[in-house]
Image: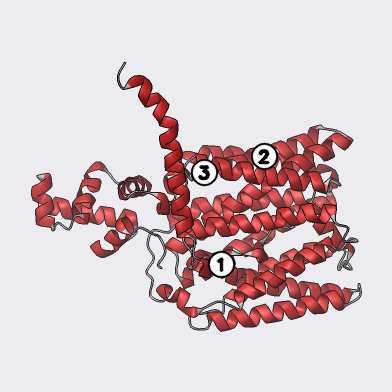
């Protein structure tokens, strides 16, 4: 029968062609000269076995392990050091921070285990946190969406590959120090290459309507950190090779699903919650060796949350913040993260037997809340990447994201075609005052103040400047 069988056989080919086209567009979005902003290694997650090696190489203070104290210093440094940055001094300030960080790390490595060495490690962590603030700013402000995804994926892959490497090559208990040394080396090299001109577009940038975009991102960001912090305080599995390989498998699965679902980050978020829920439940229910194997095979799902949370945070801060707002968000987010670090640490110290059950309940609760909020969040975040859309798809996506009414959508469409209010009124058979009313409502919902800003928002092919 004409049209029916032929169409069904051609559909896979069409889909494959669209996938190849999407990959081609993705590659074209990547600029080699911006790699210094893509590699945010100072924010790379530390896997449990590496954490243990760092504890073994440091003297505890105040009855607390060194990694716990260094984590607090890191979170404080991210916001507090970057608070003094400005567009004009950013590159010079980043170089100084990188040099001091590298110097503090070298001094820390050279010192014998003592309380003084632990204090030096805390100072280093504070400086590393400050460098992370600069790297997160560059990641958010100087990149396109595709570059952010590539950068955060490479950072996660670096961590997973090192985990496999350290399980195969005997490092004599120094895996933590070697990993941190690589973080310092790559981060310092990138920070030394920062250029003020790459951030000039932020000098007089006006911001509108960022709240509705930032709130769901921060929910997922805090949920990811809370779950990972609880998981990091559980007993460490000795099967580091299994953990690393399963993490690489989860990483490959994550990117495959991301691509086959036409670059929708929502699936990555769901897989993170589902995978970590499974990890906690299996550790809670299975005994002994079975628990270790289950933990090793599922903890790699945490990297999906790492990729999704920093990608979303970078995208929203890049589009809806300027220098001043970025500083406020940085200080608020990472200082508030101290609670997420302190709470599981306190539970682990005072009631270690309750850690697995508490972590399981927290993870399940956040997963349920995420599922309940999905209809609201999907309007704001979990939509196709702008760099891979046709103009018509971009227009429809933004109409949905901003919640425009049918009449507001019609008015915006006329305005984007260059019509005056009078011409819009004739086209839509309504009065000029009605056109103006709907236009102003559309401006407010889109967070813009003029027709020029509206046209830039709807018509630009990329979210970031060249």
Q: Which residue is mark 1?
A: 35
In the drawing, what numbered circle is on residue 259? 3
Residue neighbourhood size for the residue with mark 1, other residues' Cα within 10 Å, grouped as few (<14), some (14–19), many (≥20): some
In the drawing, what numbered circle is on residue 275? 2
Upstream in the sequence, badge 3 or badge 2?
Answer: 3
Q: Would residue 350 be seen by someone viewing this image from the given angle?
A: yes
Count of numbered labels shown in the rendering:
3
Name the element at disc 2.
helix
Q: Quadrant of residue 128?
A: bottom right
In the rendered view, would you say 327 is above or below 12?
A: below
Q: Residue at x 32, y 47 (%)?
A: 399
Rendering coords of residue 248 (x, y %): 69, 47
Q: Residue at x 82, y 32 (%)?
A: 286
Task: For the residues labelled 3 and 2, say whether their Cβ atoms are less than 8 Å apart.
Answer: no
Rendering coords of residue 308 (x, y %): 57, 51
Upstream in the sequence, badge 1 or badge 3?
Answer: 1
């Amino acid at each position: 029968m004409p049209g029916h069988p032929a169409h069904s056989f051609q559909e896979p080919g069409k889909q494959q062609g669209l996938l190849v086209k999407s990959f081609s567009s993705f590659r074209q979005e990547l600029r080699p000269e911006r790699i210094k902003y893509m590699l945010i290694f100072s924010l790379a997650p530390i896997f449990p076995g590496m954490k243990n090696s760092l504890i073994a190489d440091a003297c505890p203070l105040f009855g607390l392990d060194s990694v716990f104290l260094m984590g607090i210093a890191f979170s404080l440094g991210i916001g507090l050091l970057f608070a003094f940055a400005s567009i004009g001094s950013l590159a010079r300030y980043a170089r100084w921070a990188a040099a001091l960080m590298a110097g503090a790390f070298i001094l820390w490595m050279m010192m014998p285990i003592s309380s003084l060495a632990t204090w030096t490690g805390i100072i280093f962590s504070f400086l590393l946190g400050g460098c992370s603030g600069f790297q997160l700013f560059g990641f958010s402000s100087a990149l396109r969406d595709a570059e952010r995804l590539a950068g955060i994926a490479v950072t996660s892959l670096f961590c997973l590959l090192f985990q496999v490497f350290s399980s195969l090559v005997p490092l004599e208990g120094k895996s933590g120090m070697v990993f941190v040394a690589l973080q310092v080396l790559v981060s310092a090299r990138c920070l030394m290459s920062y250029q003020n001109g790459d951030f000039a577009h932020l000098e007089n940038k006006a911001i509108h309507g960022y709240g509705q975009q930032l709130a769901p991102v921060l929910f997922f960001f805090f949920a990811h950190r809370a779950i990972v912090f609880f998981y990091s305080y559980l007993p460490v599995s000795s099967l580091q090779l299994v953990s690393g390989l399963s993490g690489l498998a989860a990483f490959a699965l994550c990117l495959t699903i991301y691509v086959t679902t036409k670059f929708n980050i929502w699936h990555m978020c769901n897989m993170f919650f589902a995978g970590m829920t499974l990890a906690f439940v299996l550790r809670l229910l299975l005994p002994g060796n079975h628990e270790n194997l289950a933990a090793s095979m599922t903890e790699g799902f945490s990297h999906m949350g790492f990729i999704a949370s920093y990608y979303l945070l970078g995208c929203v801060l890049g589009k809806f913040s300027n220098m001043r707002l970025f500083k406020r968000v940085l200080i608020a987010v990472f200082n508030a993260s101290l609670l997420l670090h302190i709470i599981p640490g306190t539970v682990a110290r005072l009631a270690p037997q309750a850690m697995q059950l508490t972590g399981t309940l927290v993870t399940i609760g956040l997963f349920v809340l995420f599922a309940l909020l999905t209809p609201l969040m999907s309007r704001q975040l979990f939509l196709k990447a702008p760099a891979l859309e046709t103009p018509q798809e971009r227009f429809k996506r933004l109409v949905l994201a901003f919640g425009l009414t049918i009449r507001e959508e019609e008015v915006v469409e006329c305005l984007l075609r260059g019509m005056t209010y009078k011409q819009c009124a004739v086209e839509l058979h309504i009065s000029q005052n009605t056109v103006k009313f709907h236009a102003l409502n559309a401006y407010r919902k889109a967070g813009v103040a003029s027709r020029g800003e509206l046209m830039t928002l709807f018509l630009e092919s990329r979210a970031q400047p060249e």
